Image: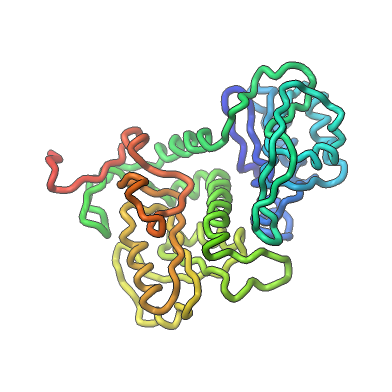
Amino acid sequence: MIVSKFNTGDFIYYDLHSEEVITSNFIEDVNLGIYCDRLQSITMERISSDITTNGTEGEKKIAFDFTNIVAVQTNINSYFTTLKNSGFSLVFVNITKEIIAQLGYDSIANSDNINSTVIFFDKTTLSPLKREGFSLFYFFENKNDFFPNNFKIEPVFKEHFKNKLKLYCENHDKQHTSSYVYLTSYINIKKLISHEKQFCLYSIIKLAIKALKEWRQSAPIPPYFPGVKSETNAPILVCQSLNSSYFVSVLSNLLKLDVLILDKIGPINKIYNSMNKSIIQDRNYIVVSDLVCLGTEVKIVKNIIEFLGGRYLGNIALIKTETLKKSDIIKKDATVAVFSIDRTNNKELKYFITTDLENNE
């Protein structure tokens, strides 16, 4: 299973850290969450097999993103060398000079290589560290003719996400179940999860990394050490709906955090009396959602947590709608998400929010 493969039209892209996360948590029984940072042979075997078995759709140019990879397994260079000898042009993105030396490629010179400081998060402290490296390192010596110097994966990912959502946007034209507005479209999250499993896993990995960065200072998620229980002040992930339960379970595994399930929070707004037995005094809580439209359900959960003595840190979601300008959103009320439905894409998605104050005839 490959989760991070993108065809940009000019080259094929692989995110090596995300693939290593898949290896650690879903293939091997290592369970390091997103804290794995050493590229293994088994991961490169999967990627190489994907390239040779499934093909690269005519492209013989490949970008390997080393972001968050700080070491590689011995003899892993054989996979890159084999691909190069098979006629593939390879570029390494955000790679440290230590890894280049470990691979034995420090003698390769290309005038298009770009020196850069590579920033990553130390898995033992979660603090950002800097190492000398390359934002782009070409595993060939001839002139680069395919990879843009200013390439960022985020726009490619968001365009891909938008195109995926188009497949699962259904006509709605009904009142929103928890807010006094009308929605023209309904995004079928259940179908998205079941039909786009690999893409959803990749998106959740990106969401986990965003969460780690968001709260590493204000209310830090403790470093993860295999076999050592998390600190008692570690945040607890709150599951508020059936759809979000899938995302919470994966995030719990990736971040090594406990989960609290608040049943029946959402469209029917039913709260059980046993709730006060679940919230722990002075503990930190992060509410996990699948899609945040107007945030009504999140506000309900936030009020419950704070009323019962817990500390609400914030909300993370796969998808959020941006109904206000970013400058008008208070940071503590902002949702951390990997994709936003906003004024740049809502027309393409046919996603509109209206009220009876407008003429909707």
In the image, 251: left or right of 62? left
* Most foreground residue, 272 or 147: 147
In the image, 307: left or right of 26? left
Q: Position of residue 141 (x, y in %)?
A: 79, 20
- Residue at (37% x, 68% y) in the render: 301
**Quadrant that contains the N terminus:** top right
Q: Position of residue 222 (x, y in %)?
A: 62, 66
Q: Quadrant of residue 173?
A: top left
Q: Position of residue 148 (x, y in %)?
A: 61, 24
State whether residue 259 is above or below residue 182: below
Does residue 241 appear anywhere in the picture?
Answer: yes
- Residue at (47% x, 64% y) in the render: 286
Q: Exactly how many numbered labels are in the figure?
A: 0
* Most foreground residue, 225 or 176: 225
Q: Where is residue 87 in the image (x, y as percent from the top left)?
A: 77, 21
**Quadrant that contains the C terminus:** top left
* Most foreground residue, 140 or 135: 135
- Residue at (59% x, 28% y) in the render: 150
Colour scheme? rainbow
Does residue 349 appear anywhere in the picture?
Answer: no
